[in-house]
Each structure stands twice: as structure tokens, then as C-alpha cells.
Image (spheres, rainbow, N blue to C red):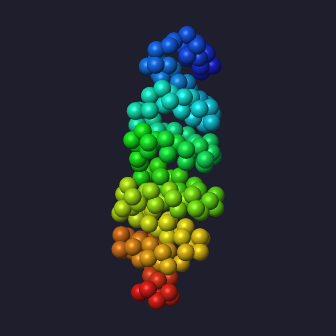
Amino acid sequence: DRTGALDAFGKELEHSKEPQVRLLAHMNRSMLYQQQRQWKEAAGELEQGLELDPSQLQAWGDLVTLYLDAEDLDGAINALAKGTTAGHRSSRHYYSVGARLFKAERFEDARDAFSETLIIEPTHARAVRSLAATMEELGQEEPALELWARYLELAPGADDADQVSQKLAAAGKR
């Protein structure tokens, strides 16, 4: 019974002053909320647990994912920043947030997320491609063309290589 388990872990939080017990109670409540697909509640519980022990590095990535599942892009950005401060820097999570920001047409935020992805993993071809498209959306054609060329260097056999080559040729870059 998930409701009973949530209540039991809630009582642990009420009665325990022990940080490790409280951390585990928050993490368990987060997992129970995840099983019920209550992403916002799950993220809130996990974030409270991470406030007790920010050194749980993998949990920062989980928190980013929960905020994405809850469609809370600002929460995901905030979790990325807090996780980075705690020592968790994941190109996968920065890229995922960037992709969602791009889809939401938040191009400046997407640019920042894709740029951070490339700081962490400079040869991340999809991030280079996504940053090129983002720069186009921001009207920054010259940097976009440089990124498209870099994308072709990193992924010469990509499905869209011909299309990108044509774009570069039309701009006089190839």
C-alpha cells in the first residue's frame, strides 16, 4: 500500500532528527511518488533529501529527470545548477534539458545548456548540431555555420550530412 508507506515515511520525517534517516525517508517518498507518476511531488521530496546531503551526486541527475518529467523546465535548470555546485556535471542531463528548452522555444536557455554540454563533452555531435540550430534561431548565422561545419567533422556519416553540406555550400563555407 503506497499511501501507507508514504505515511510511514512521513512519520519518520516528523520524529527523526537523524539526517541520514531523514534523507532515506525523503528518497523513499520520492520513489513512491515516482511509482504513482507524480513527478512534481517526487522532485520535491528528492530535493528536500538533497538539501540534507548534497553529495548524493547521482540523485542530482535523477532530480533533473524528475523536473523534466514534470515539464518544469525552470526546476530542471535550477537542479542542474545546484547539482553542478555539488559536483555533478552530466553532459547527458545538460543535453536533455537543452533539447526540451529548444522545443519550448527558449533558445537563449537552450544555448546555455548546449554550450555547457560541450564544455563537459566537446565531441558530443548531437549537442554541436543542436547548438548550431539554436544559434540559427537566435539569428547568429556565422557562429551557426561554424558549428554546422564542426558537426560534419564529428559526424560525417550522419543522416543529415548531405543537408548540412548543402547548407554550408549555399553559405559559401564548403
Q: In which quarter of the image is residue 2?
A: top right
Which quadrant would the N terminus be assigned to in this image? top right
Q: Residue at x 49, y 45 (%)?
A: 81
Counting every numbered tag in the picture gives 0
Q: Which residue is drawn at 43% across and 51% down?
A: 92
Q: Residue at x 47, y 68 (%)?
A: 129
Q: Is residue 30 above or below residue 147?
A: above
Give the camera-side residue of 66 and 122: 122
Residue that lies at the very extreme toward the front in this rendered image: 85
Give the camera-side residue of 34 and 11: 11
Which quadrant would the C terminus be assigned to in this image? bottom left
Task: Where is residue 43? Give x, y as percent.
Answer: 57, 35
Q: Is residue 4 above or below residue 101?
A: above
Give the camera-side residue of 30 and 144: 144
Q: In this view, does 31 lie above or below 120?
A: above
Q: Can residue 30 be seen in this view?
A: no
Q: In this view, does 61 lie above or below 148?
A: above
Residue that lies at the very extreme toward the top in this rendered image: 15
Task: Where is residue 97? Give x, y as percent.
Answer: 53, 52
Task: Where is residue 8? Give x, y as percent.
Answer: 57, 14
Q: Which residue is drawn at 59% across and 70% down?
A: 138
Task: Where is residue 107? Give x, y as percent.
Answer: 59, 63
Q: Is residue 111 visible?
A: yes
